[in-house]
Image (tube, rainbow, N blue to C red):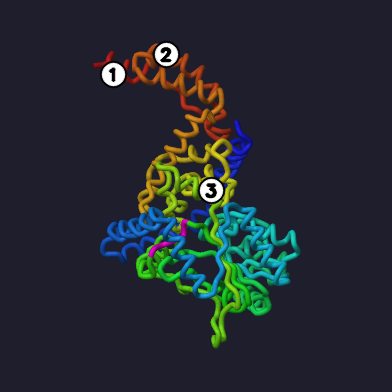
Amino acid sequence: MSEQKELFLKESEKIAFDLKHRATIKFNMSKYDAAVDRAVKRYSNLDLAKARASYIKTLAITNLHDNLLQFEKNITANGASVVWAENTDQAIEAVKKIMIENNSKTVVKSKSMTTEEIDLNDHLAEIGVESLETDLGEYIVQLAGEKPYHIVTPCMHKSRQDISRLFTEKFNTPEDSAPEYLTAWVREKLRAKFTTADVGITGANFLVADVGGIALTENEGNALMSVSFPRIHIVIAGIEKIIPRMQDLGLMWPILAAHGTGQQISVYNTLITGPKKEGESDGPEKMIVILLDNKRSELYANDDQFEVLKCIRCGACLNACPIYRNVGGYTYDATYSGPIGSVITPFFKGLKEYNHLSSACSVCGKCTEVCPVKIPLHHMLLINRRDAVRAGYGGFTWNKGMKAFEYAFSKRSRLDLMGGKTKNTFALFGTKALGEQKQIPKLADQSFSKQWTSNK
């Protein structure tokens, strides 16, 4: 058993039976469920909207090469620079070079899972650069010394009491402060950082090819301020974020909001096509876009899995997944958790080490059902399992056990060769699979088929 799999099983058992954690997640998820239910009811034909969104993203990745080149051509024509980063090291090197060349010491950073993917904050700290998260949820987990728990709601695992205690511990704010008080307190603190930071770093919800635009959608305005005040704006985005046309935003922004936060559309929606031009008073003097591959090209070349690049990071599959709801976000030990993370993490971090995530799935299909761009996620998890078996990553015991399972269950007569007592004895060897909190049920002395035959 790999170290990652062993850790996953250990953490899953601990979190699944943590009643306080489950109560917090259940409460926060219930708010999301209610909001999304209202949001999707605004669509007269939700399935048609999802089909069109899926078609747009299919066009985008089918013509990925041409769309990316068109994006580069259009945004550089407006004064921005584009850096192509094959992996994390190249992306980090590019950011560090910008910091050093411009003698930059302070960064304000809006919420971005791509920057989490490359551990940007840790790498900036290595060269003495302060990187401050400005999204409230990201700011909270940064204070706690944690990573985002959820790709849309970073501190979903924390209750209001947890957050209040954290602020009291870090900043001596009044105990049991209300969320409104803490929000205002953080806003005031961050405003000073926005106006003095050297560099602002954002991700991109979409890269718009035909206008060379960076599309950002948010609810707090922190991304827009991360762009507006600092003199340098760095964008770090995965190459899969591309969409062909600006008019596609009319569908993509609302469907992302509906499935991500349950809104008709997010509060702030911004399209940035370059740094400020001569005569303009607002905006950065320099804009650099780092297009990150980081094994996305390998996914693109995979005939069975390339469709996962259509993902718009709404988080709907995480919220629908019964496994995620029980074991939580940190158990996955990956930047991207839940069903989407279980599909792509084996590509990003290695199938041998992370193929177990694809088995953290009941194959209920709920993730596929809720996906706004119609990615067949549960099918892709099965493909990952298949590929792991073909590569021999199951381990000796697992592989031999599955062979024995296949042999026994391929014929009813083979299952009936042993009585219930013998089967119960063999079942004792698998008690660890259910953890310490559950017991394997006892099998009847005779199988159902034998009982049926004898009682017929």
The N terminus, quarter of image: top right
* Local crowd size for mark 1, using a 10 Å CA cut-off: few (<14), some (14–19), many (≥20): few
Residue type at numbered disc 1: Trp
The residue indicated by pointer 1 is 452
What residue lies at 35% left-to-right and 50% top-to-bottom? 369
The numbered mark, 2 or 3, whose residue comes first in the sequence reads: 3
Q: Residues within 10 Å of mark 3 (few under 14, many from 20)?
A: some
Front-most of 140 and 283? 283
Residue type of the residue flagged with mark 3: Lys
Disc 3/disc 1 C-alpha distance (Å): 54 Å
Residue nearest the observer in this picture, 59 or 313 = 59
Instruction: Identify the residue shown where x is 40% and y is 68%.
Output: 210
State how far apart marks 1 and 2 are (Cα).
15 Å
Q: Answer whether labels 1 and 2 touch (C-beta < 8 Å).
A: no
Q: Residue 312 appears at what percent x and percent y?
A: 44, 58
Q: Nearer the viewer, mark 2 or mark 3?
A: 3
Up the image or down, 163 lies above or below 279; here it is: above
Q: Residue 129, position in %: x, y?
A: 72, 66
Q: Residue furthest bottom?
A: 279
Determine the secondary structure under disc 1: helix
Mark toward the start of the polypeptide (1 vs 2)? 2
Point out the stretch of residues depicted in magenta. 240-244
What type is the residue that disc 2 sits on? Gly
Provide the residue designation for mark 3: 295
Up/down of 58 relative to 438, above or below: below
Q: Nearer the viewer, mark 3 or mark 1?
A: 3
Q: Residues within 10 Å of mark 2 (few under 14, many from 20)?
A: some
Task: Quote the CA–CA distance across marks 2 and 3.
Answer: 51 Å
